[in-house]
Image (cartoon, rainbow, N blue to C red):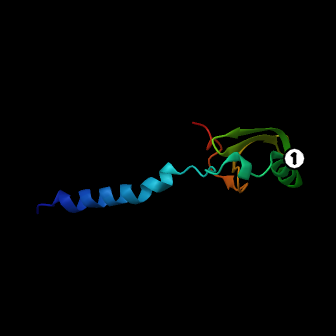
Amino acid sequence: MKLSLLPLTLGVVVACVVAAPAFAANGCSKAPASQWQSKTKLESQLSAEGLKVRQIKSEGGCYEVYATDKTGKRQNMAFNAQTLKKLANAEAGEK
């Protein structure tokens, strides 16, 4: 029985085309900095969750946050600077 590679090849190509936007977008804001939420607001939000913020940096449309939790464990998180939505990738704003 001879299998044709054409259907398999087409399937792989379609999967790559469909997945490409998900890999291209890192979740950081594309808006100008004037439309971003303030770092103070993000710090207040995180403090209310029991985190002690050590530093907040702006990188590529994201806020990268260095904090410690209630047990003293270090946390590294990234947030969309415009929406303050937490991103899965803590290094999202780095280029």
Q: Which residue is mark 1?
A: 70
Above or below for 94 versus 50 = above
Q: Quadrant of residue 18?
A: bottom left
Please give left or right for residue 4 compared with residue 72 in the image: left
Please give left or right for residue 33 compared with residue 8 in the image: right
Please give left or right for residue 26 compared with residue 84 in the image: left
Q: Nearer the viewer, residue 35 or 15?
A: 35
Position of the N terminus, as image quadrant, is bottom left
Among all residues in the image, which is located at the extreme left?
Answer: 1
Q: Nearer the viewer, residue 60 or 34?
A: 34
x then y, percent, for residue 81: 71, 49
Judge the density around disc 1: few (<14), some (14-19), many (≥20) Cα neighbours within 10 Å: few
Q: Is residue 74 visible?
A: no
Q: Residue at x 15, y 61 (%)?
A: 3
Count of labels in the image: 1
Above or below for 54 versus 83 = above
Amino acid identity at mark 1: Lys
x then y, percent, for residue 73: 80, 40
Above or below for 94 versus 83 = above
x then y, percent, for residue 19: 43, 57
x then y, percent, for residue 23: 49, 51
Please give left or right for residue 13 compared with residue 2 in the image: right
Q: Is residue 87 visible?
A: yes
